[in-house]
Amino acid sequence: MKTIGLLGGMSWESTVTYYQVINEIVNQELGGLHSAKILLYSVDFAEIEKCQADGDWDKSADILSAAAKNLEKAGADFIVICTNTMHKVVPQIQSKIGIPILHIAEATADELKRCNITKVALLGTKYTMTQDFYKEKLTRAGITVLIPDEQEIETVNNIIYKELCLGIISEISKEKYRDIIKALSRRGAEGVILGCTEIGMLIRQQDTDLPVFDTTRIHASKAAMLSTER
């Protein structure tokens, strides 16, 4: 079994889900008392969020690169960054290490293609929704990406940082997300990507008629299967 290097803490709430899903799938695949071989480096999210807010992506890349190098030194066979937004700095991190990074957007694109989705709604942080580092992985796979309007982007982003990253689950916020998803559905979305690793805490499949693609579970599942490949 390969050893997974989890780069987490962004936020720690969603990192818990990664740990749980990976272990569940490894046990399903191997049976008995098997569990995943995991190394976890959990960063201080306050430092990363400040870099995001300041637009200092180079500093955040340095922080995460140092963490990834420690995971490599400790014996990780590949890296899983437990967040969508910080995949913006994957090229910088990858250049500093000799083991691969399992990209969350590529894993999601594979799952969308498997389900024959060609036009998808994307919810996430404002960085993920408005910048190209994530969407280009999907468009390169032939998938059209729809995002909310400006006001809705701020609503989605604020709920992530002010509620979900703090473990706050609000029915009012769930209704706001559901309304935004309905609007994107009317624009032709065939599915919705929960493109922030915390959104799965708020939105589940039963909350919308559109197929839900939870990137946390997709990414974690891909990591588990990769770790058990022979």
Image (cartoon, rainbow, N blue to C red):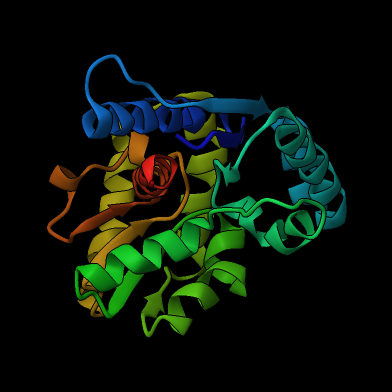
Q: Is residue 183 visible?
A: no
Quadrant of the image occupied by residue 50 = top right
Camera-nearest residue between 139 and 3 = 3
Camera-nearest residue between 176 and 96 = 96
Look at the image and tell me in which quarter the N terminus lies: top left
Residue at the top extreme of this rendering = 33
Relative image position of residue 212 (x, y in whole percent): 24, 55
Task: Using residue 47 as the reference point, say whether residue 37 is left or right of it.
Answer: left
Relative image position of residue 43 (x, y in whole percent): 71, 29
- For image coordinates 76% across by 42% down, the residue present is 64
Quadrant of the image occupied by residue 161 = top right
Relative image position of residue 114 (x, y in whole percent): 23, 69
- For image coordinates 83% across by 39% down, the residue present is 66
Residue 125 vertical position relative to residue 66 in the rendered view, above or below: below
Residue 92 vertical position relative to residue 41 in the rendered view, above or below: below
Relative image position of residue 169 (x, y in whole percent): 37, 28
Task: Using residue 140 as the reference point, say whether residue 8 is left or right of it.
Answer: right
Residue 11 vertical position relative to residue 129 in the rendered view, above or below: above
Residue at the front extreme of this rendering = 230
Residue 38 vertical position relative to residue 90 in the rendered view, above or below: above
Q: Is residue 16 visible?
A: yes
- For image coordinates 48% across by 55% down, the residue present is 124
Camera-nearest residue between 136 and 54 = 136
Quadrant of the image occupied by residue 182 = bottom left
Camera-nearest residue between 74 and 131 = 74
Task: Using residue 103 as the reference point, say whether residue 76 is left or right of it.
Answer: right
Number of marks: 0
